[in-house]
Image: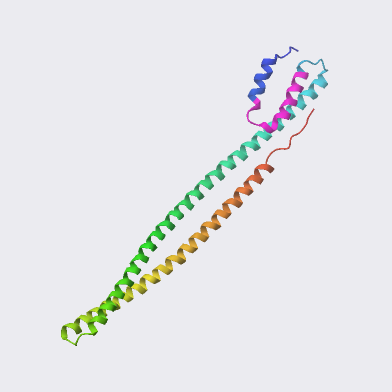
Amino acid sequence: MASVSDDEIIKKRLLIDGDAGNDEKRLTNFLRMFIRWCNSDDSPEESHISVQRMLMTLAQSDHAIQKSAQVYKMNLLEQEKYSQLNQQIGNQIQEAEQKIIGSKKELLEAKQIRKNRQEYDTMAKDIQKHPDRLGTTKKLELVAEELSQLEETKKTMEQKLDMRRKQFHVLISAIHELQAMLEEEEGGMVQEGETAKPDEMDTT
C-alpha cells in the first residue's frame, strides 16, 4: 500500500479538525492509527480490525460535532431570548422614567396649588378685616368656591401621586425579579454547556 505524504495528512487533518478543540486527542489518535494502517503489512483480518477502529473513532468525532452543533444552536436561541428580555426590560425602564417625570410634574402642580391656597387664605383674612359690603361678600364667596375647587383638585392629585408611587414600586420590584431570573437562567446555561461537552475517549 502506498504511503501517504505528510502534506496530505495535514490537509486532511485541517479539513476534519475545525473548531472541535475537545476532539483534539481523538483526532490525533485517529491520524496515528491511519498512518500506522497505511504503512503496515498486516493481514486482511488485522487490517479490517484497524479500519473498524478508525471508523468507530470517526463516528465518535461525528457524534461529538453534532452535539456541539446542537449546543451552539441552543445558545443562539437563548441569546435571542435574552435579547428580547433585555429589550423588554429597557422598555419597562423607559416607561418607569416617563412615569417618574409625570409624577414630578404633578408634584410641582400640587405644590403650586398649596401655595395658591395659602395666598387665598391670606387674602380672605385681609378681606374679612374690612366692613361687610355686597361686593366684598360676593368676592369672598368666589374665593371660597375657588378654594373648595382647589382643595378637590389637590385631593385628586394627591391620590394620583400615591397611586403612581405604588405603581412605580411594583414596576421596580418586577424589574429586580426579572433580572434575578435572567441571572439564574444564565447560570443554568453555563452548567448545561459544561455538561453537554462529550467525554474524551482514548482509542489507542
Front residue of 37/82: it is: 82
Q: Is residue 147 above or below residue 188?
A: below
Residue at point 44%, 58% (across, down): 96
Dividing the picture into quarters, in which one does residue 179 lie?
A: bottom right
Extreme-left residue of the structure: 134
Residue that extends furthest to the top in the rendered view of this protein = 2
| Residue 156 drawn in magenta | no
Q: Is residue 108 left or right of residue 176?
A: left
The one nearer the camera, 56 or 164, is: 164
Residue 169, horizontal then vertical, whole percent: 49, 63
Q: Residue at coordinates 55% horizontally, 44% vertically from top-left?
A: 79
Instruction: Tell me residue 98's x, y (percent).
Output: 40, 57
Quadrant location of the C terminus in the rendered image: top right
Give the dominant element type of the magenta stretch: helix, strand or loop.
helix
Q: Closer to the camera, 50 or 152? A: 152
For the point 42% across and 65% down, the residue is 164
On the image, the x and y values in percent for residue 54 come to 75, 26
What is the magenta range? 16-36
Direction bottom: furthest residue: 132
Residue 196 is drawn in which quadrant? Answer: top right
26, above or below 192, in the image: above
Quarter occupied by residue 53: top right
